[in-house]
Image (tube, rainbow, N blue to C red):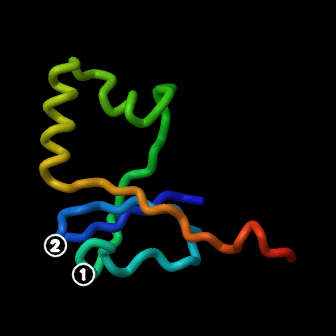
Amino acid sequence: MPFYEYACDACRVVYKTRHGMNEPGPDQCPKCSSALRKVISAPSLNTARYSSPTEAKYANLSESDEIKKEKALQKVYETIWLPEGVKHSPWDRD
């Protein structure tokens, strides 16, 4: 399943979640109940053979530049992962 990002402009929070392409995503912010908008983000393409997207993001930065960049990004939007909804109870029998 792909990852999707939804932003709440009132709270300045980005929610990351996973769901199927045909399934609806969250429509309200869990914190303030305002409307969420879907964020269009670039796909994670690993063309340089980095072990993770984070490694690729900071490959050409010094450690101090990396810390500065992260602090600047965190001032704009907070990122929160939303867990997937439970489809069934493990105790239910089919």
Please name whichever residue, 22 or 85, is drawn nearer the observer in this view of the structure: 85
On the image, the x and y values in percent for residue 54 come to 38, 34
Q: Which residue is mark 1?
A: 34
Residue 65 vertical placement versus 46 (above, below): above
Report x, y in % for residue 38: 35, 71
Q: Nearer the viewer, residue 78 or 86?
A: 86
Q: Residue at x 24, y 70 (%)?
A: 8
Query: For mark 2, what is the residue?
Result: 10
Give the camera-side residue of 11 and 25.
11
In the picture, which quadrant includes the C terminus?
bottom right
Q: In the rendered structure, which amino acid carries the disc numbered 2?
A: Ala
Q: Secondary structure at mark 2?
A: loop
How many numbered marks does the figure carry? 2
| Residue at x 15% of width, y 38% of height | 71
Q: Is residue 49 left or right of residue 69?
A: right
Neighbour tally class for label 2: few under 14, some 14-19, many 20 plus, Cα within 10 Å: few
Would you place residue 88 above or below residue 65 in this image? below
Determine crowd level at label 1: few under 14, some 14-19, many 20+ residues with C-alpha closer than 10 A.
some
Name above or below for residue 87 compared with residue 53. Answer: below
How far is disc 2 from disc 1 in space, using C-alphas? 7 Å
Residue 21 horizontal/vertical position (percent)? 56, 71
Res 63 label:
none
Instruction: Find out whether the residues at labels 2 and 1 contact each other: C-beta distance under 8 Å.
Output: yes
Q: Quadrant of the N terminus?
A: bottom right
Residue drawn at (38%, 52%) of the image: 42
Image quarter of residue 39: bottom left
- Asked if 26 appears above or below 51 in the picture, the reply is below
**Residue 40 placement: quadrant:** bottom left
Element assignment for label 1: loop
Mark positioned earlier in the residue sequence (2 or 1): 2
Residue positioned most to the top: 62
